[in-house]
Image (cartoon, coloured by chain):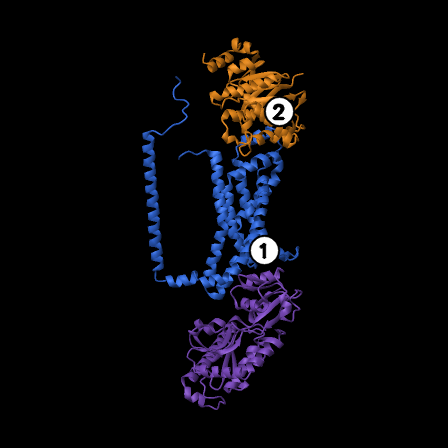
């Protein structure tokens, strides 16, 4: 059974069909890279999985459970999914440690001490131990994004969604973020990531999915997609992105 | 019996003509009286050598209608009511018997406007002010207003009989008034609420925010008669310092001003005014003087 | 040789020293000009005022120390009442204003009645002059006979709370709406409920954004507290007015005004300090 399964997911904004029947499955501990031009529907897809957007048709199953059922409590589902955003979206009025532990304490019912202990441990592990009391405005972009990742994974969610998390970063800072994601994969995480980092996708992803105009056009292993793209649109996209 | 339209008009015209002639006759006789000073007073009038509008008679004016307690039943000729009583006392002092007092009515404003008058003296609770003195003459005061406590029946203040009883109640007074000054002096400032206007103070009373209000006695009469439902004047204070002075109004430059003033002074000196005040502004209206 | 990457000691070059000297000199010059021109202006103004024909009369009428000193105790006692009303009003306004802001920002058709109620409330009380609300609340409600007698100051507090909550609620709502939607999305994505998101993420940030506006409303409320005198309560304003009526001298008003300013000063300074600190933290402004 796959951890995440999308069946015929559709989403329309006004007259524009952003998702036109998406079928996708992600297995446990699998890392799937989502590629596509802007407007192809990647972000909308991730938001739909996180129940931030309501699908207009189709189903999304998380561990076999249909989370698009209106009777499902959306807040509970969202607490099982970790999300990291392109713009970090840390809470500027909270310190780093409070940012990271907020959901653990308020949603998952951890005690403050428990949450802080684990959070400090994780932050120290990535070299941010001395920043725990600081406010986000004092951190560089890369540091903020890594804090955001720790915030997303503190409560060990079943699924991790990464929405172009390095696109807003200075090239020098991208590396440290990608290293962190790699280490997550090594410790066993189910990750669905929209990304423009082709090299990273190739080295970390188990599977690559190419989206075009709201549909999954092609999917396969990194080698298949990057070296032998079948569809013309895939080829054009790769050519543009890697400046070949 | 039906009267034809023509007949009716003729009768109406005739009546109108008769009225006009009569009125002209009246006024011309008045003119005749004022234009012949010495001869008028020479007729057999019992009064002193005073020039009055109607020779031998003292013409006194008051308001229409005249309210209590100033005049009882709107009929000043009975002498009942504070101002009616004062008027007859002054007339007697001047040497006019009751039969020689003639009552007329005038509006408040016309009385204190400049110009000739068709009465000798006028009294309608006129306060003596410098501004009015420019237009008319005043006698010396025949009354100085006191402050009174007004409430509604059923209120805690309604049954109070002494100043001490009032000290524990929440009372109100309008700001910057003699009412406030007197209340603060006699009752203390602790429980005294101060309002912008008399209207606000009345509003506070009817809303139940205060047990009673302090205002001058004439206003108290007005409030209990006209504005308040179940209004009650609990009592008045003896101290009339700072109160309004009421004076008799005379035409500016009138020859009567000096004798009338002397009369009022005499009545004040011999206690007549005080007796009249006690009778008509305290006993007759159940407004005891609180101690 | 990797070049001068890690110099332990760096002394400013002659060029930089010249720049600093120039800036310092220019700065001293402008301070001196400002100082001298202020003094000259102050001297001219005071000279013309003190030598104006009516100065002695004005001084005696508005700045009479004896009258002021005699009126001071009564005014101070009244000011204590103003302070108590201000304190409780502020709490009430904060609570009711936040409630209104939240009610108006609820989404979805099912909450339409709540939104409509809040909108109607803010429309009504932002439109009505405070003095009319004071009359309606302070005289009208007691007249209904539903409540035992309450002091005029209590009704005054209620009137002020009810009116200012409408303004403050709108300010808070504006602050909430100024919080970027991505903050809300991030919070919901973490599993926080709508209520938790509001309470922990949106409102804290929203209020920070509108602190200057809120402080402004607070200072304004501080002055409007003086209006409770209309209901009969003897506060600082009424106390001053009683003295004025007794002495026919306006100095007590000046005394009361000074006391009100003194009362407001700490709040004004605090506002400036807080706003500056927030701006520094969130905006990183440079030299412009």
Residue that numbered label 2 is attached to: A81
Identify whether A37 is placed above or below B168: above
Bin the neighbour count of mark 2 within 10 Å (Cα to Cα): few under 14, some 14-19, many 20 and up. Answer: many
Judging from the image, mark 1 belongs to the subunit labelled C
Q: Are marks 1 and 2 on the same chain?
A: no
Identify whether C213 is placed above or below B156: above
- State the purple chain: B
Is residue C235 at all visible to an observer of this figure?
no
Q: Tell whether label 2 touches label 1 (CB within 8 Å).
A: no
Question: What shade does chain C have?
Answer: blue
Q: CA distance from mark 1 to mark 2?
A: 54 Å
Give the position of the C terminus of chain C as an image quadrant: top left
Secondary structure, mark 2, is strand
Check residue C153 in the rendering and tell me which mark sits there, or answer none: 1
- State the orange chain: A
Identify whether C67 is placed above or below A96: below
Which image quadrant is residue A210 in? top right
Q: Nearer the viewer, residue B142 or B30?
A: B142
Q: Position of residue A107 (x, y in %)?
A: 64, 31
**Image point 54% across, 39% down: which residue?**
C207
Is residue A227 at all visible to an observer of this figure?
yes
Q: Nearer the viewer, residue C100 or C191?
A: C191
- The reply, left or right, for residue C10 in relation to residue A209 is left
Q: Position of residue B46 (x, y in %)?
A: 50, 90
Q: Nearer the viewer, residue A88 or B138?
A: A88
Judging from the image, mark 2 belongs to the subunit labelled A
Q: Position of residue B220 (x, y in %)?
A: 58, 69
Q: Position of residue B125 (x, y in %)?
A: 52, 74
Bin the neighbour count of mark 1 within 10 Å (Cα to Cα): few under 14, some 14-19, many 20 and up. Answer: many
């Amino acid at each position: 059974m796959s951890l995440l399964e999308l069946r015929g997911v559709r989403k329309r904004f006004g007259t524009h069909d952003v998702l036109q029947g998406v079928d996708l499955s992600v297995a446990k501990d699998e890392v799937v890279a989502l590629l596509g031009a802007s407007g192809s529907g990647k972000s909308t897809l991730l938001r739909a999985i996180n129940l931030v957007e309501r699908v207009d048709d189709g189903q999304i199953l998380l561990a076999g459970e249909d989370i698009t059922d209106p009777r499902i409590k959306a807040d509970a589902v969202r607490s099982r999914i970790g999300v990291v955003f392109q713009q970090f979206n840390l809470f500027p009025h909270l310190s780093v440690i409070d940012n990271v532990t907020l959901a653990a304490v308020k949603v998952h019912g951890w005690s403050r001490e428990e949450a802080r202990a684990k959070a400090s441990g994780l932050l120290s592990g990535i070299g941010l131990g001395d920043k725990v009391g600081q406010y986000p405005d004092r951190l560089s972009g890369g540091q903020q994004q890594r804090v955001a990742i720790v915030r997303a994974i503190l409560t060990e969610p079943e699924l991790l969604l990464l929405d172009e998390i390095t696109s807003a970063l200075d090239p020098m800072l991208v590396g440290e973020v990608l290293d962190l994601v790699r280490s997550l994969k090594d410790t066993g995480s189910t990750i669905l990531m929209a990304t423009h980092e082709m090299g990273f996708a190739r080295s970390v992803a188990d599977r690559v999915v190419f989206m075009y105009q709201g549909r999954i056009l092609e999917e396969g292993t990194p080698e298949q997609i990057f070296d032998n793209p079948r569809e013309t649109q895939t080829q054009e996209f790769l050519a543009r992105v890697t400046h070949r | 019996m039906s009267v034809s339209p023509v007949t009716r008009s003729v009768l109406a015209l005739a009546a109108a003509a008769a009225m006009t002639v009569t009125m002209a006759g009246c006024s011309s006789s008045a003119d005749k009286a004022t234009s012949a000073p010495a001869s008028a007073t020479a007729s057999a009038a019992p009064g002193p050598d005073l020039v009055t509008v109607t020779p031998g008679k003292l013409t006194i004016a008051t308001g229409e209608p005249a309210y209590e307690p100033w005049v009882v039943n709107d009929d000043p000729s009975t002498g009942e009511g504070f101002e009616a009583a004062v008027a007859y006392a002054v007339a007697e002092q001047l040497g006019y018997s009751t039969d020689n007092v003639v009552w007329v009515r005038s509006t408040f404003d016309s009385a204190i406007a400049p110009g000739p008058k068709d009465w000798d003296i006028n009294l309608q609770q006129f306060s003596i002010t410098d501004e009015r003195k420019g237009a008319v003459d005043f006698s010396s005061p025949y009354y100085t207003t006191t402050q009174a406590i007004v409430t509604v029946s059923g209120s805690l203040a309604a049954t109070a009989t002494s100043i001490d009883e009032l000290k524990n109640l929440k009372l109100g007074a309008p700001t910057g008034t003699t009412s406030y000054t007197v209340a603060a002096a006699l009752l203390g400032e602790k429980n005294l609420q101060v309002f912008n206007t008399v209207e606000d103070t009345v509003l506070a009373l009817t809303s139940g925010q205060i047990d009673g209000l302090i205002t001058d006695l004439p206003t108290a009469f007005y409030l209990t008669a006209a504005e308040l439902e179940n209004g009650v004047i609990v009592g008045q204070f003896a101290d009339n310092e700072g109160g309004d002075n009421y004076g008799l109004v005379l035409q500016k430059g009138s020859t009567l001003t000096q004798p009338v003033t002397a009369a009022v002074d005499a009545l004040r000196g011999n206690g007549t005014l005080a007796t009249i005040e006690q009778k008509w502004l305290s006993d007759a209206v159940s407004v005891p003087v609180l101690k | 040789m990797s070049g001068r990457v890690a110099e332990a000691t760096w002394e400013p070059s002659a060029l930089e020293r010249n720049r600093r000297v120039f800036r310092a000199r220019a700065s001293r010059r402008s301070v001196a000009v400002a100082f001298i021109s202020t003094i000259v202006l102050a001297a001219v103004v005071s000279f013309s005022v003190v030598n104006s024909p009516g100065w002695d009369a004005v001084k005696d009428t508005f700045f009479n120390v004896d009258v002021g000193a005699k009126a001071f105790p009564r005014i101070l006692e009244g000011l204590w009442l103003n302070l108590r009303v201000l304190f409780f009003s502020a709490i009430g306004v904060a609570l009711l204003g936040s409630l209104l802001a939240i009610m108006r920002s609820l989404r979805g058709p099912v909450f339409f009645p709540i939104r409509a109620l809040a909108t109607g409330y803010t429309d009504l009380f932002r439109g009505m002059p405070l003095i009319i609300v004071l009359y309606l609340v302070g005289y009208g409600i007691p007249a209904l006979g539903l409540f035992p007698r309450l002091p005029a100051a209590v009704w005054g507090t209620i009137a002020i709370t009810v009116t200012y909550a409408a303004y403050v609620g709108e300010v808070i709502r504006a602050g909430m709406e100024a919080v970027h939607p991505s903050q809300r999305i991030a919070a919901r994505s973490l599993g926080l409920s709508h209520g938790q998101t509001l309470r922990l993420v949106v409102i804290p940030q929203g209020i920070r954004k509108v602190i200057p506006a809120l402080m402004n409303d607070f200072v304004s409320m501080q002055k409007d507290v003086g209006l409770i005198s209309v209901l009969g309560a003897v506060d600082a304003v009424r106390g001053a007015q009683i003295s004025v009526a007794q002495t026919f001298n306006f100095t007590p008003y000046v005394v009361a005004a000074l006391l009100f300013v003194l009362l407001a000063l700490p709040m004004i300074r605090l506002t400036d300090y807080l706003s500056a600190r927030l701006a520094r933290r969130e905006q990183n402004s440079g030299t412009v």
